[in-house]
Image (cartoon, grey):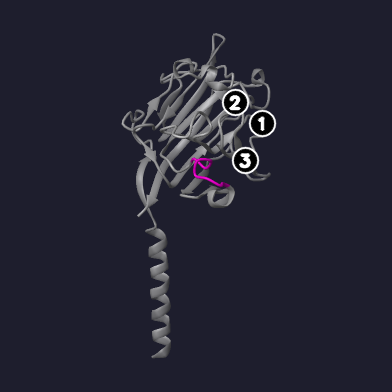
Amino acid sequence: MRFFFRVSFLVIIHDCLFESKSDYWQLVWDDEFEGPLIDTNRWNFEIGDGCKYGICKWGNDEQQLYTDSIDNAFISDGKLIIQAQHIDNQYTSARMITKGKGDWKFGKIEIRAKFPSGEGLLANIWLLPTYSRYGLWPASGEVDIAARFGEKTGRSVSTIAHYGAVYPDHRHSRRDYTVNYPQPSFTEEFYTFTFEWEENKMQWFINNVKVNELAGDETFPSKYIFPFNEKFHLTLSIAVGGRPVFGNILETVFPQRLEIDYIRVYQKK
């Protein structure tokens, strides 16, 4: 009788813990890329060389023109493809944003992605503020969930937060994560990138391994220096050339692809 009670009690505890863990997050936005076309109810495109947005060459002396062409962004085999091309001496690519269609304050963002392999490319999965309440970039913040700066091996990605003041007086927290052989590189295989974001804490994970953390209550004396208490939106892009990227873009064979299997955004219940 005592044994039965103990087993029953342990089962109840296990079930409660499992239920609380699985019910901790609620899915609030997602894109599984199952349709034939990019969902314009979820995504906008930023196009051109950045001048129309007041940041010519996108602020980094980048060489590409962003377009909304199906040559640069499309869905194939249930995946979003952002494709950088080099045709007639012109680099083109795509920069997709959820601004106005997916803006969040705190939560968990999970993305399964595979990065391009070329040198001299900045492929980025990142968050930008929907409203720049604390000033120009990056005083209002930027979060790079996963960025690849074009190094040759494809085995390193960066997780970064930019904050603190207007460029060039800002700060950043950066951690690079490297996978070693015989593990496949970030350009050979899909990896799951997760960003968890609370009021005073941000954490980055790759395949469920924590790779970076930034705590606002410990690091920052004021909420105006830690700007991540406002709504942010998701941005997906491949930039060509500019700074700070590694390698010689002339050595890269185009086209180059950033592939996204799915994006899921959760918030606490």
Crowding at dot 2, Cα within 10 Å, few <14 / some 14-19 / many 20+, comes out as many
Q: Is residue 218 magenta?
A: no
Residue 103 in view (yes/no) = yes
* Magenta highlight: main SS: loop
SS state under label 2: strand
The residue labelled by disc 2 is: 121
**Of residues 214 and 36, which is closer to you in this image?**
214
Q: Quadrant of residue 24?
A: bottom left
Q: Check the image and name the residue furthest to the top.
A: 88
Q: Which of pointers 2 and 1 lies earlier in the amino acid sequence? A: 2
How far apart marks 2 and 1 lie (CA) works out to 9 Å
Magenta span of residues = 220-227
The residue labelled by disc 1 is: 151
Identify the residue shown where x is 34% and y is 45%: 28
Under mark 3, the amino acid is Arg
Which one is in front in this view, the residue at disc 3 or the one at disc 2?
3
Q: From what the image shows, is residue 269 above or below residue 111? A: below
The residue labelled by disc 3 is: 174
Q: Do the residues labelled 2 and 1 touch (CB within 8 Å)?
A: no
SS state under label 3: strand
